């Protein structure tokens, strides 16, 4: 079973995505902030990360760097309400493999995660 870490400061989004990905057969870990995300990435065998770019305690780019320092091969898929080209480029430069713009289409996220975590 693939393990997915979902990092978003909005509880409703975390719970919605957890429910969706549990139904898709993933073991889901949830983090509300960067510190929790990094702790889980250190402790668990995470296969992929779905990460919101705007987290209160640190930027999405900082979280990508720290998670990639723990496991450089882990795919990180970004979510953001901002679709600025520079933000997307920076996220990709730091190692993000996919970028979803909020509000997102849930089927697009499911298909994106599945394609990255084959």
Image (tube, grey):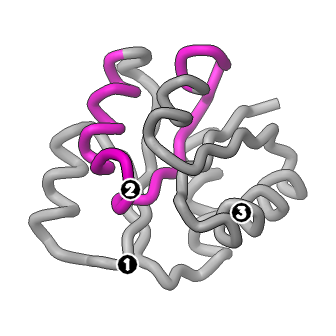
Establish if 78 lies above or below 66. Answer: below
Q: Quick one: SS at disc 3?
A: helix
Separation of residues labelled 2 and 3 (CA atoms): 19 Å
Establish if 103 lies above or below 70. Answer: below
Badge 2 vs badge 3, beta-carbon distance below 8 Å: no
Res 98 → quadrant: bottom left
Tell me the mark number nearer the camera, choosing from 2 and 3: 2
- 25 inside magenta stretch: no
Whichever of labels 2 and 3 marks the residue nearer the N terminus, that label is 3
Label tally: 3
Foreground: 69 or 40?
Answer: 40
Res 48 → quadrant: top right
Q: Quick one: SS at disc 1?
A: loop
Residue 54 placement (x, y as % from top left): 35, 62
Residue that badge 1 annotates = 81
Q: Which residue lies furthest to the front in this view?
A: 57
Is 16 on the left-hand or right-hand side of 41?
A: right
Separation of residues labelled 1 and 3 (CA atoms): 16 Å
Establish if 100 lies above or below 45. Answer: below
Q: Residue 56 shows which numbered tag?
A: 2
Residue that badge 3 annotates = 17
Q: Quick one: SS at disc 2?
A: loop
Residue 7 placement (x, y as % from top left): 54, 50
Whichever of labels 1 and 3 marks the residue nearer the N terminus, that label is 3
Is disc 3 surrounded by few (<14), some (14 to 19) or many (20+) residues within 10 Å?
many
- The magenta segment is 41-69
Is 83 on the left-hand or right-hand side of 54?
A: left
| Residue drawn at the location 82% of the way across and 30% of the way down | 1
């Amino acid at each position: 079973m693939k393990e997915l870490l979902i990092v978003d400061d909005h509880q409703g989004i975390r719970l919605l995505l957890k429910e969706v990905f549990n139904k898709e057969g993933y073991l889901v870990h949830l983090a509300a902030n960067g510190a929790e995300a990094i702790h889980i990435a250190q402790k668990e065998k995470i296969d992929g990360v779905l990460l919101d770019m705007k987290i209160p305690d640190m930027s999405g780019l900082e979280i990508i760097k720290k998670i990639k320092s723990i496991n450089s091969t882990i795919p990180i898929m970004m979510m953001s309400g901002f679709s600025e080209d520079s933000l997307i480029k920076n996220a990709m430069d730091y190692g993000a493999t996919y970028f979803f713009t909020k509000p997102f289409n849930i089927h697009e996220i499911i298909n994106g995660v599945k394609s990255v975590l084959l």
